[in-house]
Protein backbone atom coordinates (compact mmCIF):
# COMPACT_ATOMS: atom_id res chain seq x y z
CA UNK A 1 0.00 0.00 0.00
CA UNK A 2 1.26 3.45 -0.87
CA UNK A 3 1.09 6.12 1.83
CA UNK A 4 1.89 8.89 -0.62
CA UNK A 5 3.28 9.41 -4.10
CA UNK A 6 4.71 12.51 -5.70
CA UNK A 7 2.72 11.85 -8.88
CA UNK A 8 -0.51 12.10 -6.90
CA UNK A 9 0.41 15.73 -6.26
CA UNK A 10 1.81 17.01 -9.52
CA UNK A 11 -1.38 16.38 -11.41
CA UNK A 12 -4.39 18.66 -11.22
CA UNK A 13 -3.89 21.92 -9.32
CA UNK A 14 -0.12 21.63 -9.03
CA UNK A 15 1.57 25.05 -9.52
CA UNK A 16 2.90 25.34 -13.06
CA UNK A 17 5.87 27.45 -11.97
CA UNK A 18 7.39 24.72 -9.78
CA UNK A 19 9.53 21.73 -10.74
CA UNK A 20 7.76 18.38 -10.36
CA UNK A 21 10.15 17.23 -7.64
CA UNK A 22 8.61 19.81 -5.27
CA UNK A 23 5.60 17.48 -5.13
CA UNK A 24 7.80 15.14 -3.09
CA UNK A 25 9.27 17.62 -0.61
CA UNK A 26 6.71 16.96 2.13
CA UNK A 27 7.12 13.21 1.64
CA UNK A 28 10.91 13.47 1.63
CA UNK A 29 11.09 15.50 4.83
CA UNK A 30 9.04 12.86 6.63
CA UNK A 31 11.09 10.06 5.05
CA UNK A 32 14.30 11.76 6.24
CA UNK A 33 12.91 11.73 9.80
CA UNK A 34 12.05 8.04 9.41
CA UNK A 35 15.58 7.26 8.25
CA UNK A 36 17.28 9.38 10.91
CA UNK A 37 15.21 7.53 13.53
CA UNK A 38 16.01 4.06 12.16
CA UNK A 39 12.41 3.28 11.23
CA UNK A 40 13.11 2.35 7.61
CA UNK A 41 12.21 -1.07 6.28
CA UNK A 42 14.45 -4.09 5.79
CA UNK A 43 14.35 -3.61 2.03
CA UNK A 44 16.24 -0.32 2.33
CA UNK A 45 18.56 -1.69 4.99
CA UNK A 46 19.67 -4.30 2.44
CA UNK A 47 19.36 -2.41 -0.85
CA UNK A 48 19.95 1.25 0.06
CA UNK A 49 22.63 1.18 2.77
CA UNK A 50 24.86 3.84 1.24
CA UNK A 51 21.98 6.23 0.67
CA UNK A 52 20.62 5.67 4.18
CA UNK A 53 24.00 6.77 5.51
CA UNK A 54 23.99 9.78 3.19
CA UNK A 55 20.58 10.87 4.51
CA UNK A 56 21.69 10.37 8.11
CA UNK A 57 24.79 12.47 7.40
CA UNK A 58 22.66 15.06 5.57
CA UNK A 59 24.61 14.56 2.35
CA UNK A 60 21.41 13.90 0.39
CA UNK A 61 17.87 14.92 1.25
CA UNK A 62 14.93 12.72 2.04
CA UNK A 63 13.38 13.94 -1.20
CA UNK A 64 16.47 12.79 -3.12
CA UNK A 65 16.12 9.39 -1.41
CA UNK A 66 12.41 9.30 -2.31
CA UNK A 67 13.13 10.05 -5.96
CA UNK A 68 16.25 7.89 -6.40
CA UNK A 69 15.51 4.90 -4.16
CA UNK A 70 11.70 4.84 -3.98
CA UNK A 71 10.70 5.92 -7.49
CA UNK A 72 8.82 8.90 -5.96
CA UNK A 73 6.55 6.53 -4.00
CA UNK A 74 6.28 6.11 -0.23
CA UNK A 75 5.23 2.50 0.46
CA UNK A 76 4.78 0.20 3.45
CA UNK A 77 8.01 -1.59 2.48
CA UNK A 78 9.90 1.65 3.08
CA UNK A 79 9.16 1.28 6.79
CA UNK A 80 9.75 -1.06 9.71
CA UNK A 81 6.68 -2.40 11.52
CA UNK A 82 6.95 0.39 14.09
CA UNK A 83 7.45 2.92 11.31
CA UNK A 84 4.31 1.66 9.60
CA UNK A 85 2.24 1.92 12.78
CA UNK A 86 3.41 5.45 13.49
CA UNK A 87 2.94 6.51 9.85
CA UNK A 88 -0.62 5.19 9.83
CA UNK A 89 -1.32 7.23 12.95
CA UNK A 90 0.53 10.41 12.06
CA UNK A 91 1.19 10.72 8.34
CA UNK A 92 -2.12 9.35 7.08
CA UNK A 93 -4.05 11.72 9.35
CA UNK A 94 -4.08 15.48 9.18
CA UNK A 95 -1.54 15.62 12.00
CA UNK A 96 1.54 15.55 9.77
CA UNK A 97 0.30 18.06 7.22
CA UNK A 98 -0.90 20.34 10.02
CA UNK A 99 2.58 20.29 11.57
CA UNK A 100 4.18 20.71 8.13
CA UNK A 101 2.00 23.72 7.41
CA UNK A 102 2.54 25.38 10.78
CA UNK A 103 6.30 24.87 10.67
CA UNK A 104 7.01 25.52 7.00
CA UNK A 105 4.26 26.55 4.63
CA UNK A 106 1.72 28.74 6.43
CA UNK A 107 3.15 31.89 4.81
CA UNK A 108 3.67 30.34 1.38
CA UNK A 109 1.34 30.08 -1.60
CA UNK A 110 1.11 26.26 -1.29
CA UNK A 111 2.83 23.46 0.60
CA UNK A 112 4.69 22.71 -2.65
CA UNK A 113 6.55 26.01 -2.34
CA UNK A 114 8.49 24.79 0.72
CA UNK A 115 12.21 24.66 0.02
CA UNK A 116 13.77 21.22 0.15
CA UNK A 117 16.48 21.95 2.72
CA UNK A 118 17.99 20.55 5.85
CA UNK A 119 17.14 23.82 7.60
CA UNK A 120 13.47 23.12 6.95
CA UNK A 121 13.92 19.54 8.08
CA UNK A 122 15.36 20.81 11.38
CA UNK A 123 12.34 23.08 11.87
CA UNK A 124 9.91 20.21 11.25
CA UNK A 125 11.72 17.29 12.92
CA UNK A 126 10.99 18.36 16.53
CA UNK A 127 7.26 18.39 15.75
CA UNK A 128 7.44 14.88 14.26
CA UNK A 129 9.52 13.70 17.22
CA UNK A 130 7.02 15.15 19.70
CA UNK A 131 4.15 13.40 17.89
CA UNK A 132 6.15 10.16 17.88
CA UNK A 133 6.92 10.42 21.60
CA UNK A 134 3.27 11.10 22.37
CA UNK A 135 2.17 8.19 20.18
CA UNK A 136 4.73 5.86 21.73
CA UNK A 137 3.92 6.79 25.33
CA UNK A 138 1.79 4.02 26.83
CA UNK A 139 -1.68 5.02 27.90
CA UNK A 140 -3.08 4.09 31.26
CA UNK A 141 -6.01 1.72 31.03
CA UNK A 142 -8.40 4.46 32.21
CA UNK A 143 -7.22 6.75 29.36
CA UNK A 144 -8.53 4.49 26.58
CA UNK A 145 -10.46 7.38 24.99
CA UNK A 146 -7.31 9.45 24.23
Image (cartoon, grey):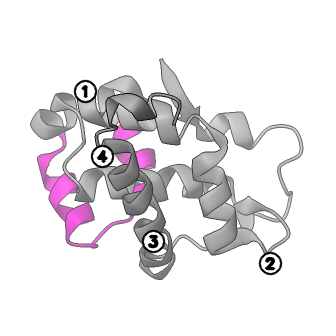
Q: Secondary structure at mark 2?
A: loop
Q: How far apart are labels 2 and 4 at the CA level?
A: 32 Å
Q: Position of residue 117 (x, y in %)?
A: 49, 76
* Residue 133 in sight in this render: yes
Please report the residue visible at 73 percent of the width from the left and 61 percent of the height from the top. 111
Q: Position of residue 80 (x, y in %)?
A: 23, 32
Q: Secondary structure at mark 3?
A: helix
Question: Could you tell me what secondary structure mostly forms the magenta stretch?
Answer: helix
Q: Earlier in the sequence, mark 4 or mark 3?
A: 3
User: In the image shown, does 73 or 124 lie closer to the viewer?
Assistant: 124
Q: How far apart are labels 2 and 3 at the CA level?
A: 17 Å
* Residue 63 in sight in this render: no
Residue 107 marker: 2
* Residue stretch in magenta: 48-70
Q: Secondary structure at mark 4?
A: loop
Q: How far apart are labels 2 and 1 at the CA level?
A: 35 Å
Q: How far apart are labels 4 and 3 at the CA level?
A: 24 Å
Q: Quadrant of residue 133?
A: bottom left
Residue 121 marker: 3
- Using the image, determine if residue 19 lies above or below residue 145: below
- Dot 1 surroundings within 10 Å: few (below 14), some, or many (20 or more)? some
Q: Which residue is mark 4?
A: 137
Query: In the image, 15: left or right of 130?
Result: right
Q: Which residue is mark 1?
A: 81
Amino acid sequence: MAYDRADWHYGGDYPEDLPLENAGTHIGLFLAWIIKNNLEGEFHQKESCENLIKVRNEEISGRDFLIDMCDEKFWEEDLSEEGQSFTKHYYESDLYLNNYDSALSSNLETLYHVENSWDNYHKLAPLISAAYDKWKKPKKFWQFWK
